Amino acid sequence: MEITNCTTDKAKRDALLVKDALENGSQKAYSDLMRYYRDPLYYTLLKMMKNPYDAEDLTIEAFGKAFKNLEKYTTEYAFSTWLFKIAINNCIDYMRRKNASPQCVDEDFCVFENSCESNDSLSQEETYMQKERAEMMHWAVDQLRPKYRTLIELRYFQELSYEEIAQTLNISMNNVKIQLFRAKYMLSSIMEKMKSAI
């Protein structure tokens, strides 16, 4: 990666981190980029979503997408500008999808959790459908690679916090968030294929 057009110390610092991440696979470089921009990105998305849970998930998603496409970044723009553009576009897409189709992985996890509890307000048909979705979710989780399956089970089935997962797996909290994003992305793809096959 060629470092040009870095007019400020911050721009040069970010460009060097991106270069280190790309060329050396440096986990520290990825972690540093997250550390510098996680909070400002989260608060920007919080203003858009008005929901801390969605803002948190979309922040992690934005970093996941940015890191996955890091080779497309050029120093023509500040890294922060590029990252925020990805995050805001992703946020807009998420809101469109949510309005068009409320079915998403997180909601399927909610259905899984609710299916474990008796709910007298649901009809027999609704209860049956809920159990079907919970079984689909379990099957989909089983298709994941062991590393990602463990993350999903710890986060959603055992309801551990990011910090608790980091301690359990002896990895950094940023790694937990990045890997959990990847796991949810893969799980979402599996669920979509299953739904389209029905």
Image (cartoon, grey):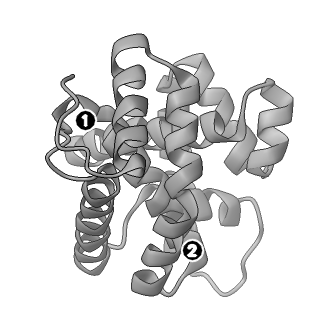
Residue 13 drawn above or below residue 78: above
Estimate the spatial distance between the alpha carbons at disc 2 and disc 1, rounded to whole Å. Answer: 46 Å
As rendered, which of 28 and 127 lies closer to the eye?
28
Q: Residue at x 32, y 69 (%)?
A: 91
For residue 111, say whether it is visible.
Answer: no
Which residue is labeled 2 in the image?
A: 124
Q: Amino acid at mark 1?
A: Asn
Q: Residues within 10 Å of mark 2 (few under 14, many from 20)?
A: few
> Contact (CB < 8 A) between labels 2 and 1?
no
As rendered, which of 138 and 145 lies closer to the eye?
145
147 relative position to 125: left or right: right
Q: Amino acid at mark 2?
A: Gln
Q: Residue at x 17, y 43 (%)?
A: 5
Q: Which quadrant holds the N terminus? A: top left
Element marked by disc 2: helix
Q: Position of residue 97 (x, y in %)?
A: 25, 70
Residue 198 drawn above or below residue 54: above
Mark 2 / mark 1, whichever is N-terminal: 1
Q: Position of residue 153 (x, y in %)?
A: 69, 38
Q: Residue at x 50, y 87 (%)?
A: 50
Q: Residues within 10 Å of mark 1 (few under 14, many from 20)?
A: few
Which residue is labeled 1 in the image?
A: 69
